[in-house]
Image (spheres, coloured by chain):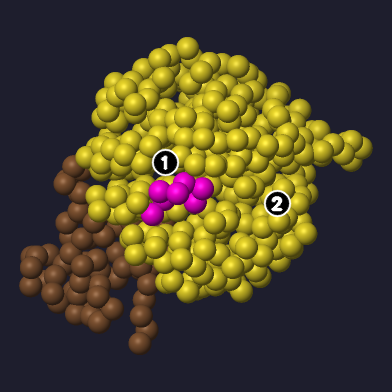
Amino acid sequence: MDRPYGLLAELTYACPLQCSYCSNPLQLEDYRDELSTEEWQRVFAQAADLGVLQLHLSGGEPLQRKDIVDLVKSANDLGLYTNLITSGIGLSKRRAQQLRDAGLDHVQLSIQADDQALSDQIAGTVSFERKQAAGKLIKELGWPLTLNVVLHRQNIDRIDRIMEMAVSMKADRVELANTQYAGWAGPNRAELLPSREQLERAEVAVRAAQERLSDRMEIIYVIPDYYSKYPKPCMDGWASRQFTVVPNGEALPCPAAHEVARGLDLPPATVREHSLEWIWEEAPLFQQYRGDAWMPDPCRSCDRKEIDFGGCRCQAFALTGDAARTDPVCHLSPDHGLVEAAVEAANDPTRPRGSLIPRPQVVRLNLGATVTQGAKS
Amino acid sequence: MTYNAARGEYALLSPETIWVINATGAAIVELCDSQRTIADIRAELRSRYEQVADGDVERFVADLVTKHGMEVDHG
């Protein structure tokens, strides 16, 4: 078994934004009992001992944690490469300077759209201008700037304009990532999944931007797996390269595995009871789909099993109720009809227009206490 | 670039990517100081190692530059 390279620390699920494609779990309430500063610091130290090199600080909105500067400093002192994944809300000039001084290596800023009204609508919160200000601040302080744009039916036709905005923001990297249907994106799939025509135009726009801007920035395009023949090599295999610790200290082999973990009826692997080393090497949840012994056919006898590892366990669970099935995205999956039906609906010109369910806004009052507002799941 | 004792290997870290590199690769990265040219680096490596073929350093550096793991200072 290899040692993990990366740890995604989801520090809190509090977030001022309400994006309906949010990958956070539907049961946000269950994760309110957040790890303390000391507990996270212990997790980071154990991660470094385990050989982790990169620490991604995410959420929710990680800047909702009042101790974010202390957490970055501890991680930096341990020699970890630190990456802050943020909406930009809460990144004041003073906070940014403190994070810079604490040794934060990189900032990834989420972008919803190039247009203020659309951006604020997708985010469910007035945030466009503050994101622009955050981007400016990130560059002024000398950080490399990555913009992450989740693509879906409502913004995928705007790639040219989004890229113009990325140029004006002096971004160094842009991730154009088609929505993955985990968390809140699941119940919103019918409104988020783009049509085939939209995707074809998007791919042309992405290729043109990559050629035009190759000397200026790196553009990463994450393909929509619903339209591909084979599944993604999700996480490079279950518990293979990296893992996630969620706000209440549960460790997951993948950032979307909350539901799978519950569905399996295994004891939770929590950092409050176990060391990261034990979790990585011994926890039943981490062993469950490691390697290929768990695979059913068609994966078991497939020569691509070393390439895509059977696809995404969380997607298999979400669509079929059984995480051990072949990812239904694969055209060889006996459940592929589920994906075909969703694609067909997205391409039906007479499809009724529904509405998106916003992720509830969760506001953090102080350490360990969060309140939830807005729509309930 | 970092050397990780727990892993016993060198790695070059960028925002979402980790390149694990061997000792020779690490030596090249260390020598890339925005002052030395490729030829300087090749000469330095030849003083340390017996076999450094023409093009080895170029290939390594060009690969990392293409992947945005390194930048070229044309100054």
Q: In this view, does A48 lie to the left or right of A208?
A: left
Q: Name the residue under label 2.
A: A125
Hey, which quadrant is residue A44 in on the image? top left
In this view, the residue in front, B46 or A233, is A233
Residue found 29% across the figure and 50% down from its top:
A74
CA–CA distance in space, label 1 to label 2: 24 Å
Sort mark 2 into few (<14), some (14-19) or many (20+) by Cα contacts within 10 Å: some
Q: Where does the magenta region start and end?
A: A63-69
Q: Nearer the viewer, mark 1 or mark 2?
A: 2
Residue found 70% across the figure and 63% down from its top:
A114
Chain B: colour as depicted: brown
- Judged from the image, the secondary structure of the residue bearing numbered disc 2 is loop
In this view, the residue in front, B32 or A78, is A78
Q: As shown in the figure, which amino acid type bears the numbered disc 1? A: Ala
Image spot of residue A353 (x, y percent):
87, 39
In this view, the residue in front, A23 or A301, is A23
In this view, the residue in front, B61 or B10, is B10
State which chain is coloured yellow. A
Q: Residue A9 carries which label?
A: 1
